[in-house]
Image: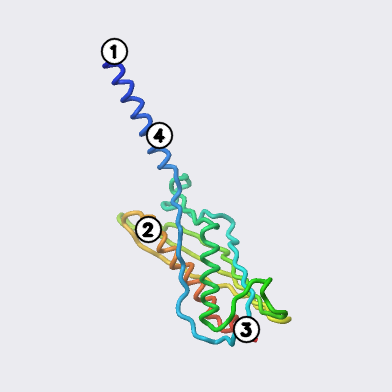
């Protein structure tokens, strides 16, 4: 009798522990470690130095909800600490491919051009469809400020993506979608001929 009670108690503890683990998993947001890529660039620079600064100016790391709900388990999060270095690396890579020499403020010659890249918006939403499909929508905005001499140019570059689905997108799919949108917005930044002329002076 004692052994049976002990076995029942152990099973109860195990079930409670399992439920606690599942509950903890259910309240975890989906964290996306994205990998944006800048598209092909033409060579337009002539070895000019460009002081580069990259910032994440989003109001929150949370970009939206997988199903429009407000519970923690539905949140999508893109961590600033992971994203900003990747944006900086892609910015530096794009400038080098275009014929510029990206440098820090400490390395720059006097009069070097300055380029500030800021991610100002990254918003994920869900549009309800018919009985079977919904649509995931994503909007990303990058702001660029180029300063050369006494001239200053500011541009804003938006990329969007709509993805229909019957089952909620996986973490992998959402990561891919966010990576593409940020990469598209950054590519459009470097396709702005007015911005590039500002750096090429």
Q: Which mark is residue 172?
A: 2
Outermost residue toward the front?
A: 107
Per the image, the residue denoted by label 4 is: 20
Given contact means CB atoms under 8 Å apart, are the residues at marks 3 and 4 in contact?
A: no
Distance from Cα at disc 3 to Cα at disc 2: 39 Å
Q: Quadrant of the C terminus?
A: bottom right
Going from N to C along the chain, the mark reached first, 1 or 4, is 1
Residue 10, above or below 175: above
Residue hosting label 3: 48
Give the number of the mark in front: 3 or 4: 3
First in sequence, mark 3 or 4: give its number. 4
Specify the farthest residue to the top: 1
- Estimate the spatial distance between the alpha carbons at disc 1 and disc 3, rounded to whole Å: 83 Å
N-terminal-most mark, 1 or 3? 1
Residue 151 visible (yes or no): no
Mark 1 and mark 4: Cα distance apart in space: 27 Å
Q: Quadrant of the N terminus?
A: top left
């Amino acid at each position: 009798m004692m052994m049976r009670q002990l076995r029942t108690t152990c099973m109860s503890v195990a079930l409670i522990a399992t439920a606690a683990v599942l509950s903890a998993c259910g309240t975890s947001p989906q964290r996306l470690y994205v990998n944006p890529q800048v598209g092909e660039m033409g060579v337009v620079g002539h070895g000019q130095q460009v002081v580069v600064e990259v910032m994440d100016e989003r109001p929150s790391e949370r970009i939206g909800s997988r199903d429009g709900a407000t519970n923690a388990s539905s949140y999508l999060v893109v961590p600033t600490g992971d994203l900003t270095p990747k944006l900086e690396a892609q910015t530096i890579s794009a400038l080098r491919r275009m014929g510029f020499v990206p440098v820090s403020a400490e390395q720059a010659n006097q009069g070097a051009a300055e380029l500030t890249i800021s991610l100002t918006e990254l918003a994920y939403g869900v549009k309800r469809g018919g009985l079977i499909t919904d649509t995931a929508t994503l909007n990303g905005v990058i702001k660029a400020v180029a300063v050369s001499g006494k001239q200053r140019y500011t541009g804003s570059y938006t990329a969007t993506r709509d993805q229909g689905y019957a089952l909620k997108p996986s973490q992998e799919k959402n990561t891919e979608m966010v990576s593409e949108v940020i990469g598209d917005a950054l590519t459009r930044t470097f396709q702005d001929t007015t911005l590039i002329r500002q750096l090429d002076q």
